Image: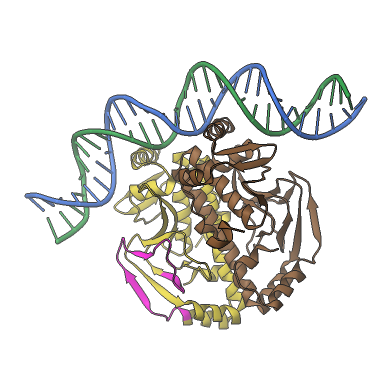
Chain colours: A yellow, B brown, C blue, D green
DNA sequence: CGTCATATTGATCGCGATCAAACTTTGTGG
DNA sequence: CCACAAAGTTTGATCGCGATCAATATGACG
């Protein structure tokens, strides 16, 4: 299922067109491999089919900032007409993704305005997620940042049916979490232990368990509205 | 001039269509007034015609994080189909903006795919700016963050012809700069003094002067590529 | 069973927060 | 044009979150 379908009511023709896109060839990468590198460009757009990926930017001195995570169904590389991408995208787990030639995508957008608007919405939600990260990095404590990130990812996973009960697969290492929240791995480890001690979350064997969702939501000041979740679709499903 | 024109080569029909949009009524607001508030929505898109505006998010405890600045020509509120906006937009100076009914805009996008892609590009650049802010807030020191912000704004102003030599009008207070860079006003003031002492920039009477652009660019690790500037257009103009 | 990534612990340091108070500029109404 | 208020800037003293440095577990995996 494509994330696009969340942002527009699709006609059967729309859906057919989208399914046409997903018949495009599937590329597989191993964990750690790079999909597209900062400073390059290629005339394609991509849809993550399985696995987790992440976007990051490198600094001259070797540090890096992770600027977002991609989950199955997410559309990315909508870099139509931009000279080059400003960040790198790499696989966190083994992944597979569809690659759709830009020309084909553009032609489709032209015929089906509905899809075009859905693509724009996809970008708008990505943008909204980044703004929430800005609030985290600018104003929240390390504890709150981490809690917020857990809530974001858990909520997004729930939306695509990749949770079971209060837990979900979770491939991020403490190092990854540190690079995403802008703290050092050492400090992240300590914050992680606080959360465990507080019985808020449990993270082991690549599996995340949210032990007290309500309290975590409050502590992290998390409100799912920016993810454009309908309340029904998140509460029960 | 609309920012859109930077992202696509417009045919004369395209340009005509855009100019049609700009004949829509102009709204004026005084400094400090709010354009649209977080949590609300309205079926229009807007184009800033004059003045500076900014996007911010409030926290429950009264703090705020500024997540971006809007300059003349910038398109915003592309919240087609999104339930509600996730942040507030307010005027920093007296501003005027065009308000285009969503239906009219959508119809135009449908007829002129070129414009539709340019609108998407506009969103992509906004998004790229936010990612650069994420790097600042996550990895850079207060000094580097401020330097980077100065470079971003100066470069964007240069693009729209709002600089003269090495200086530009600059309405942000130290308080605004603090809320954008995620430091306290007190600390921002001290960083500001360092920059002055280092003869990098001078900021007084709402006017910013970049005294040593090369050194500032290096210290702040600024590379204008993410703004999609053509090198010619920024070097000489 | 050795190697390499990941997680953990302890000790110390420093950037930027916080608190509190003056000072300076800008704006407004009498 | 001055008096006063309000906004913005500056200074000083102290505190603490998270960085840094350094070592030690604990796995995962060929």
Quadrant assignment, res C10: top left
Q: Nearer the viewer, residue A30 or B5?
A: B5
Image position of A36 (left or right of B103): left
**Residue found at x 61% / y 66%:** B6
Assess whether residue A46 is covered by the magenta stretch: yes
- Decide which of A123, C21 is in the foreground and name it: C21
Q: Position of residue B48 (x, y in %)?
A: 71, 57
Coordinates of residue B232 in the picture (x, y in percent): 55, 62
> What is the magenta range?
A21-48
Residue A206 in view of the camera: yes
> Image check: A125 left or right of A170?
right
Image quarter of the N terminus of chain B: bottom right
Of the 4 image quadrants, the one containing the C terminus of chain B is bottom right
Q: How many marks?
A: 0
Q: Which residue appears at 42% of the width and 80% of the height? A: A24
Asked if the magenta segment contains residue A176, the reply would be no
For residue D17, side relative to residue B116 (left or right): left
The image shows residue C15, relative to residue A71, as above or below, that is: above
Question: In the image, is residue B231 above or below residue B32?
Answer: below
């Amino acid at each position: 299922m494509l994330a696009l379908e969340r942002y527009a009511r699709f006609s059967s023709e729309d859906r057919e067109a989208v399914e046409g896109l997903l018949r495009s060839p599937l590329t597989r990468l191993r964990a750690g491999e790079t999909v597209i590198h900062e400073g390059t460009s290629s005339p394609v757009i991509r849809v993550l089919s399985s696995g987790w990926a992440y976007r990051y930017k490198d600094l001259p001195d070797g540090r890096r900032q992770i600027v977002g995570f991609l989950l199955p169904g997410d559309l990315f590389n909508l870099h139509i007409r931009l000279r080059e991408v400003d960040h790198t995208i790499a696989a966190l787990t083994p992944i597979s993704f569809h690659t759709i030639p830009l020309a084909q995508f553009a032609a489709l957008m032209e015929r089906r305005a509905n899809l075009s608007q859905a693509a724009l919405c996809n970008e708008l939600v990505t943008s909204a997620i980044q703004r929430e990260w800005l609030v985290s990095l600018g104003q929240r404590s390390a504890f709150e940042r981490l809690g917020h990130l857990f809530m974001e990812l858990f909520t997004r996973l729930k939306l695509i049916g990749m949770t079971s009960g209060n837990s979900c697969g979770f491939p991020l290492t403490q190092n990854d979490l540190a690079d995403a929240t802008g703290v050092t791995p050492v400090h992240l480890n300590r914050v992680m232990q606080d959360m465990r001690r507080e019985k808020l979350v449990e993270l082991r064997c690549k599996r995340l368990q949210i032990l007290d969702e309500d309290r975590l939501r409050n502590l992290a000041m998390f409100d799912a509205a920016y993810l454009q979740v309908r309340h029904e679709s998140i509460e029960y499903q």
